[in-house]
Image (tube, rainbow, N blue to C red):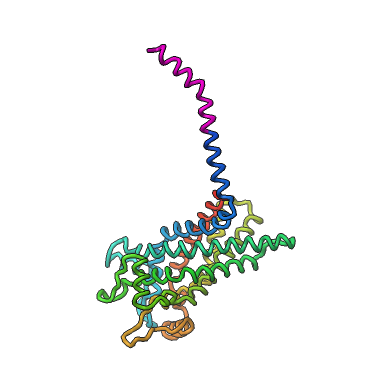
């Protein structure tokens, strides 16, 4: 028995390095193929969009309950100047009392679709525009400044918002459905059900309801988020000895504040316009973005536009932080 196994063992031992070398070569070849694929012109152009979409979807999954509460706060007390003010705690209690904890994730499918479309587009367009501006600045022997970052942020936000408006509309409708009388609720099963139901009952054009404030809000948010993030990160890198992770976290927190400040009034109006439906008289409560601004200011007071700023910041800042950190990490892995 031993005379039979010993030569076999010797053969295996002698071929061990050869086999390991072959396995290593195969692994190296696979890595090289993957690396070459990532560096094809198509993938270099597509990666900012892919990474942006994945980063946004991760962030939305984490932040969805906060977004749900934010929407309910914005819709509370509509058309009334006085009355008790909705708070994050009271809204959370109300949601949990009327259903279950998973109700905080109402509209998650719409939120994920929105990120797959909107964040994919906005981060992809931002990187694309920034790369173009960087090449132009380098050719002139200049550096990238805040004006270029602002231009890239505004452009990316506006284009992405137009593309993503139907998913955004479906998200608002799904999140506000629970506020309607039980007999009038649509009880949407998914984002596809919401989109098809809206298109059937109100027309395909209704999927772009609230597009104007959505675009303005996106431009304001991206101006605050992407431009200030890029600028803050550049300044922190130049003026501090902080680690890259600390710089990214700090820059994203700064960006979250400015994104919230600039975009909340437009987010408020967008929510009101996208939630509205025709009343018994066949008329909509608001006829336009300007009309909504004017009516809310007159009936509810000017400060109503900033109601829930804390909740909005808690929704925007962590979302920005998770999105930008994941996008940075994915960019590092695929560069």
Q: Residue furthest bottom?
A: 281
Q: Is residue 94 magenta?
A: no
Give how far across and how far down residue 311 sits, in percent. 43, 67
Q: Is residue 20 magenta?
A: yes
Give how far across and how far down residue 7 sits, in percent. 45, 15
Whether residue 265 is visible to the viewer of this picture, yes or no, is no
Which residue is at a point 39% across and 68% down the rendered structure image? Answer: 171
Image: 292 above or below 70 = below
- Left-right relation of 324 to 66: right
The residue nearer to you, when weighing 273 against 190, is 190
Which residue is at a point 72% across and 62% down the rendered structure image? Answer: 142
Query: Principal SS element in the magenta part?
Result: helix
Image: 191 above or below 272 = above
- Left-right relation of 201 to 54: left
The residue nearer to you, when weighing 321 against 134, is 134
The residue nearer to you, when weighing 267 against 155, is 155
Where are the magenta residues, as a range? 1-23
Give how far across and how far down residue 302 sits, in percent. 47, 81
Which residue is at a point 54% across and 57% down the rendered structure image? Answer: 46
Give how far across and how far down residue 30 sits, in percent. 53, 41
Q: Determine the image quadrant of residue 278.
A: bottom left
The residue nearer to you, when weighing 106 against 335, is 335
Q: Residue furthest left?
A: 183
Whether residue 25 is visible to the viewer of this picture, yes or no, is yes
Q: Determine the image quadrant of residue 307.
A: bottom left
Image: 105 above or below 3 = below
Image: 113 above or below 326 = below
Image quarter where the N terminus lies is top left
């Amino acid at each position: 028995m031993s005379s039979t196994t010993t030569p076999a063992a010797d053969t295996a031992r002698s071929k061990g390095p050869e086999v390991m070398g072959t396995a290593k070569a195969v692994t190296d070849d696979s890595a090289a193929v993957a690396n070459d694929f990532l560096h094809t012109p198509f993938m270099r152009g597509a990666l900012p969009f892919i990474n942006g979409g994945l980063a946004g979807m991760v962030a939305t999954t984490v932040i969805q309950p906060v977004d749900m509460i934010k929407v309910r706060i914005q819709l509370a007390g509509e058309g009334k100047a006085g009355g008790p003010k909705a708070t994050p705690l009271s809204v959370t209690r109300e949601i949990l009392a009327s259903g279950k904890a998973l109700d905080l994730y109402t509209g998650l499918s719409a939120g994920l679709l929105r990120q797959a479309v909107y964040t994919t587009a906005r981060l992809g367009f931002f990187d694309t525009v920034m790369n173009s501006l960087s090449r132009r600045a380098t050719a002139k022997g200049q550096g990238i400044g805040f004006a270029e970052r602002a231009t890239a942020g505004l452009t990316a936000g506006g284009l992405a918002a137009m593309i993503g408006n139907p998913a955004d509309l479906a998200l608002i409708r799904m999140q506000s459905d629970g506020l309607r009388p039980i007999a009038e609720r649509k009880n949407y099963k998914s984002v596809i059900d919401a989109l098809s139901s809206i298109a059937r009952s109100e027309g395909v054009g209704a999927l772009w309801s609230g597009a104007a404030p959505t675009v303005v809000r996106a431009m304001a948010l991206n101006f605050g988020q992407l431009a200030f993030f890029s600028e803050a990160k550049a300044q922190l890198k130049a003026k501090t000895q902080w680690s890259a992770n600390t710089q990214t976290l700090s820059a994203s927190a700064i960006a979250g504040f400015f994104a919230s400040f600039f975009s909340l009034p437009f987010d408020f109006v967008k929510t009101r316009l996208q939630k509205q439906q025709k009343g018994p008289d066949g008329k909509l409560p608001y006829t336009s973005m300007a009309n909504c601004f004017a009516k809310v200011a007159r009936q509810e007071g000017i400060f109503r536009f900033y109601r829930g700023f804390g909740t909005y910041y808690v929704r925007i800042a962590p979302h920005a932080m998770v999105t930008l950190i994941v996008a940075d990490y994915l960019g590092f892995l695929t560069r």
